[in-house]
Each structure stands twice: as C-alpha cells, then as structure tokens.
Amino acid sequence: MNTMAFKTLRALADGGFHSGEAIAQTLGVTRSAVWYGIRDIAGAGFQVEKVRGRGYRLSRPLSLLDAGAVSGLLGPQSATFVIEVIDSIDSTNTRLMQRAAAGAPSGLVLAAEAQTAGRGRRGRTWRSAVGSTLTFSLLWRFAQGARELAGLSLAVGLALARTLRAAGATGVALKWPNDVVLPSGKLSGILIEMQGDVLGPSAAVIGIGVNVCADSRVADQVDQPLTDLESATGNAVDRNALLARMLAELSCVLGSFAQNGFSPLRAEWQQLHAHQDRRVRLLLPDGESLAGIARGVADDGVLLLETAAGVQGFHSGELSLRGEIAP
Ligand code: BTN
C-alpha cells in the first residue's frame, strides 16, 4: 500500500462513516486522491462499505499504531524508548540493524504496519497483514559480548509469554528456542540478530511478530497452524496498548538479564515449556533427526535432550524442535 492508501486507512480506522469530501479536507488532498486511496485499501484486502449520503466505512474498526499513544501508555517508562512507527518497510530488523551499525541508541523501537520482506528464523519469510499483526524491532545494547548473551532469545520469549498471558491468553507456552504458542498454533515469533564485539560491547536487534487477529491474508500463506490473540482472549486487542505492555516487560526482563543472565529466569521458562519432559524429535540442520526427552534448558539457554547416550545440550539456531512423538 502506498502513502495515500495508509492515510486513507487511518482516516477510516475508527470504523465510522466518513464522506469522501471530509476525508479529502482532513488530509488536504483532492476527492480523486481519496478515491484512489479507497481503491488501494480495498485492493489490499480491507472491506470498505460505501453508503450513499453517508460515505465510506471499514467493515470493522482497526487499531493502527501510533507512537504518541504507545509513549503515553508507557508513562514514565517511555524515557527508556524512542518509538518510531512506519507505514511500510522491507523488514524492521533489517532497518534496525543498519541504524544500530550507524550508532542508534539502545531502546530504539521500529514498529511497522506492513513489512514487504519480513524475516523469520532459519531464513524463513515472516508474513503479516496491516492491522492484524504487531511487528516491531527493539534495539538493546549490552556491555557483554554475544557469547555471554546466549540465553537472550529465551529471556525475550519469556517476556512475550508474560505479556500475552497478562493480556488474557490462556495456555500460553514456549517452544524452544522462543516461539510463543497456544495449543491451537503459533501466536508469536522472535528473530534476534546481534552485532558488536564477541567480548563486548554488543547490540541486539530483537524482532517480534505477534498475530493479533485472524487474517486469511496471512493464514493462507503460512504452512503451519497459526493462532491469534483476539481468538485466544475473545476480546478486541488495542495494538498500541499491547506494544506498550510488551516494551515495559521487555525492559524489565532485559534489565534483569543484563545483570544476572538467564539463570534466574530459567525455572519460569521451564514451567512454560511446551515440551517439558515430553518425548520429542529434534531436526538437525543436516537433515538428520534425534529422538529423546526434552529436559528443559541450561543456564546458557541450550536445550537439554535426554537420549540413550545421556543428556546432551543443543544450541538455538542449529536445530528445530518438532512435536511430540508416540512413546
Ligand atoms: C520466527 O518465528 O521465525 C521469527 C519471526 C520474527 C518476525 C519479526 S516481525 C518484526 C521483525 N522484522 C522482521 O523482519 N522479522 C521480525
């Protein structure tokens, strides 16, 4: 969607009727520019009703991102963050990695309504849809080097799980290393990219995608079961409030992690571990797989798998954990 389409979408986001003339006046554009905007948002999959004498409205209201609203909701904690909202970008992670290399401050958040090249773990594509997904990246700087931050992705998963539970989702679990899942499917994914010196200091770009409401534009393109926060809670979700709560929780968990590492968070992580003490199969990068019992994680975040050969540790990023197998 182009800039005019996003402006039109923002003008209609409240779900009320707005005449073409009123939208044109508010945006300071011509009626035909509004018409093109309406055409483009309809083309992007939004249902726009047109009623003679009343104007246009969206079939359902949209909670669009607003940096000022997120800062307001964060209150005094907003001082920790610099929040930027972008209509459309290739990938918030890609852009934030560039900004980090150029010296951007810790706490910089890039949140996007649309990503044209959203990236997932292990080189996968991350699909999202305007208004239905929360996609953002947070830059966090550490005095330590990457080696000492080995449990970071698990700590971030825990912060997300806490937030999503507090938002009313029941049955939230963590799938190693850091997918947040419900029994009905994946709710959220995390992609962390590092830069800096091995011995420190270092910077982490923490990219997070949350499925907020069901959207066939996403589900049709993804080959794994997905679920979303609105279906899980039965309530409409204000994405600005969700982002504010996530940032507040991330600041708390990252502060603790920088001081004391993953170890104090480990017991809580294991309580939420979807596969704890269950039989699992690990798919190795070379295509081989290994069956065993998932015995949780070590203080540095490695997965502990009990096999006939004993308990072995596996690093995140090397492996993928697949569902339970028959005993
Ligand atoms: C995964 O589950 O594989 C991780 C998904 C991470 C997606 C987020 S969306 C915001 C940020 N920008 C990206 O390109 N990816 C992450």
Image (cartoon, rainbow, N blue to C red):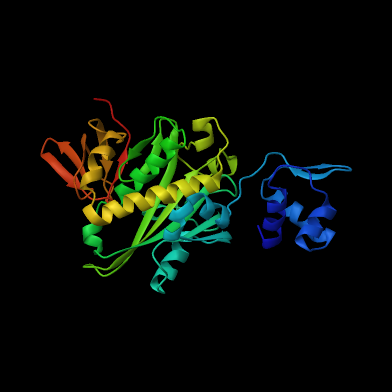
- Please, which residue is most extreme toward the left here? 309
> Which sits in the foreground, 24 or 312?
24
Q: Is residue 56 visible?
A: yes
123 up-or-down from 201: above or below: above
5 sits to left or right of 229 = right
Q: Residue furthest front?
A: 76
Q: Quadrant of residue 25?
A: bottom right
Residue 289 shows up from this direction = no
- Name the residue at the bottom extreme: 102
Q: Work out whether 297 lies above or below 111.
A: above
Q: Which quarter of the rendering shows the N terminus?
A: bottom right
Residue 73, horizontal then vertical, whole percent: 51, 49
Q: Residue furthest right?
A: 53
The image shows residue 157 at horizontal and vertical percentages of 35, 45
Q: Residue at x 15, y 43 (%)?
A: 312
Q: Residue at x 25, y 33 (%)?
A: 276
